[in-house]
Amino acid sequence: MKRYGQDKVWPFAEGGEGTIGVVTAVATLFLLLHRRFNNGFTKALFLLSSGIWLLILYFFRDPNRQTDAKPGLVVSPADGEIVAIIRERENRYLNADTIRISIFLSVTNVHVQRSPLNGRVTLVDHQPGKFLQAFRPEASDINEYIAMIIDTPYGPLLVKQIAGILARRCVNPMQIGDTLQTGQRFGLIRFGSRVDIFLPPNAQLLARIGDTVHGGLTPLAQLQE
């Protein structure tokens, strides 16, 4: 099976092609109009559409990264800022005590998500919901999200891609039985939002609230078998 983001021919996120294509077409149209009529109005339209085009390319950038995978080392699944680290019981999917780390993605962060640890996918569940601001605590449960469980040598890890007020589409094409390597791309949230990762309660935390993290690179915790 072709993996998400494998054999890319351009440095942009898989799943962003449609948006990039539409904005490129609009910018090209306004360029042609400006070349045809060459007035202040068409120039303004062309400059505005060109600016939006550049922003879209920036939003959907997907740089290659080399993950330093070590046994039991959990790396961040997303770029952004850690806004919460909470010990709580996760009853819906794991039915276990966990440590939840919430990462807020702004519109300027890389939108691609990466596997926090190597393992096998045992669940992918898309739940419709609301589109509240992603930094609100209740967003994890009531906003639209995609939950994925990765069965690792250190136990199951739950990762949730959570939609927000701007980011209204999460992409995760993984299927049950797929294998993921630490740092491997697995999905995308368009225009930022939030990613939650649920760790075993005995995980040794290596990150703090307020830390800036990078998907596939920044260590979050060390797990023990």
Image (cartoon, helix red, strand yellow):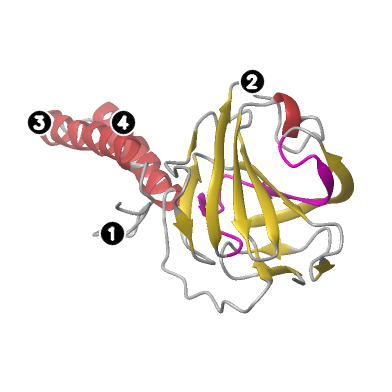
Q: Earlier in the sequence, mark 4 or mark 2?
A: 4
Q: Is residue 79 visible?
A: no
Residue for badge 3:
36
Element at label 3: helix
Q: Say the numbered circle drawn on residue 8.
A: 1
Q: CA distance from mark 4 to mark 2?
A: 36 Å
- Labels 3, 1: front one: 1
Q: Nearer the viewer, residue 44 or 25?
A: 25
Q: Nearer the viewer, residue 198 or 178?
A: 178
Q: Residue at x 21, y 30 (%)?
A: 39
Q: CA distance from mark 4 to mark 1?
A: 32 Å
Element at label 4: helix
Q: Nearer the viewer, residue 183 or 213?
A: 183
Question: Label 1 crowding class (10 Å Cα cut-off): few <14, some 14-19, many 20+?
Answer: few
Q: CA distance from mark 4 to mark 3?
A: 13 Å
- Quadrant in which the C terminus appears: bottom right
Residue for badge 4:
45
